[in-house]
Image (cartoon, helix red, strand yellow):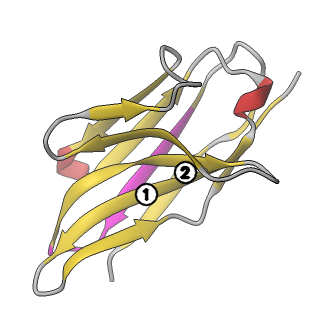
Amino acid sequence: QVQLVESGGGLGQPGGSLRLSCAVSGSGFSINSMGWYRQVPGKERELVAIFSSEGTTTYGDSVKGRFTISRDNAKNTAYLQMNSLKPEDTGVYYCYARIERRLIGVVALWGQGTQVTVSS
């Protein structure tokens, strides 16, 4: 079974840092794109950061210059380094991956979500 395993997050202080990680577990797949979206109550889910297999990286406007997405291809894992945290970064962060599974095709995966709270 192919699934996303998330870790990290929790409580951070304004101006501080947190890191999220997300791994695609299983076998027989390749990753097309991978990243994070976040959601706060009453608002739509918004893009935080995502990278594609072509090498492009896209960041949401509100996190540009503060958050950095990286990956370890050997571990099928992505990381989100969140610096200069702001209270408005508070929300549930969902890992997303678009993978291609052998004999099945393209599949979109979502993680269970990780709460990030930025507060003093």
Front residue of 114/66: it is 66
In the rendered view, does 1 fall on the left or right side of 20? left
Rendered location of residue 49, percent (x, y) = 44, 37
| Residue at left offset 36%, top offset 33% | 58
> What residue is disc 1 on?
96
Residue 35 is left or right of residue 83, and the answer is left
Displayed quadrant of residue 54? top left
Residue 11 locus on image (x, y percent)? 77, 35
Residue 24 placement: quadrant? bottom left
The amino acid type of the residue labelled 2 equals Ser
Indicate which disc, 1 or 2, sits on the residue closer to the N terminus.
Answer: 2
Q: Residues within 10 Å of mark 2 (few under 14, many from 20)?
A: some
Q: Which residue is mark 2?
A: 7
In this picture, which residue range is highlighted in magenta?
A: 19-28
SS class, disc 2:
strand
* Left or right placement of residue 9 versus residue 2 in this view: right
From this viewpoint, is residue 116 visible? no
Which element type, helix, strand or loop, lies under badge 1? strand
> In this orientation, which residue lies closer to the viewer: 75 or 81?
81
Query: Could you tell me which residue is drawn at 50 percent across and 32 percent down?
Result: 60
Q: Residue at x 23, y 45 (%)?
A: 52
Q: CA distance from mark 1 to mark 2?
A: 13 Å
Magenta stretch holds residue 118: no
Q: Main secondary structure of the magenta part?
A: strand
- Where in the figure is residue 117, as x and y percent of width and height? 78, 37
Decide: is 14 above or below 98: above
Look at label 1 and name its amino acid.
Answer: Tyr
Closer to the camera: disc 1 or disc 2?
1
Q: Is residue 49 visible?
A: yes
